[in-house]
Image: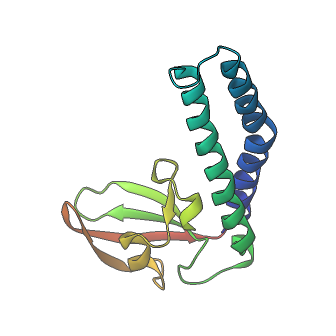
Amino acid sequence: MTRAGHAALDQELKALKTVERPAVIKAIAEAREHGDLSENAEYHAARERQSFVEGRIKELEAILSRAEVIDPAKLSGAIKFGATVTLVDEDSDEERTYQIVGEAEADIERGLLNIRSPLARALIGKDAGDSVEVRTPGGEKSYEVLSIRYV
């Protein structure tokens, strides 16, 4: 996991513990004051939210406890974890830039590509100027690696 990804998950965990958890506990207490719990929608919604928050806390704690933080700035050479890669689609000439990151921090909308994705797996070990073929749900795609940066 990158340092930025680790920091983001750690920040989310702190927010869940210091903001969300107390808010849910308060909402449950307020809903209990309304009486009959069997027909109390506010109570059931608050308990459901509590279940989600506690589950996410456990998930984040597990991810962070197992995470190995890698600083991409200390890397160089062929594409590997942490690389920021600029590609050009050989069919449409559309350029895209992705950083190859761990599963927990992946967000394709922000250009953070899951290392387990077909595109990332195809890119690993390639150098600038290389072409890669990737099988996608929409068919075969060809990309050329324009540049590799480690930031």
Residue 77 in sight: yes
* Whether residue 80 is situated above or below residue 17 in the rendered picture: below
- The N terminus sits in image quarter: bottom right
In which image quadrant can residue 105 be found?
A: bottom right
Residue found 71% across the figure and 52% down from its top:
8
Residue found 82% across the figure and 39% down from its top:
18
* Whether residue 66 is situated above or below residue 51 in the rendered picture: below
* Whether residue 149 is situated above or below residue 131 in the rendered picture: above
- Nearest the eye: 61 or 5: 61
Horizontally, residue 117 falls left or right of residue 102, namely: left
- Nearest the eye: 128 or 14: 14
Residue 2 in sight: no
- Residue with the most extreme right position: 18
Q: Position of residue 4 (x, y in %)?
A: 71, 58
Residue found 47% across the figure and 81% down from its top:
124
Q: Position of residue 49 (x, y in %)?
A: 59, 36
- Residue with the most extreme left position: 139
Horizontally, residue 58 falls left or right of residue 119, namely: right
- Nearest the eye: 30 or 103: 30
Total numbered circles: 0
Residue found 60% across the figure and 25% down from its top:
43
- Nearest the eye: 127 or 23: 23
In which image quadrant can residue 121 be found?
A: bottom left
Display colour scheme: rainbow
- The C terminus sits in image quarter: bottom right
Q: Position of residue 47 (x, y in %)?
A: 60, 35
Horizontally, residue 104 falls left or right of residue 129, namely: right
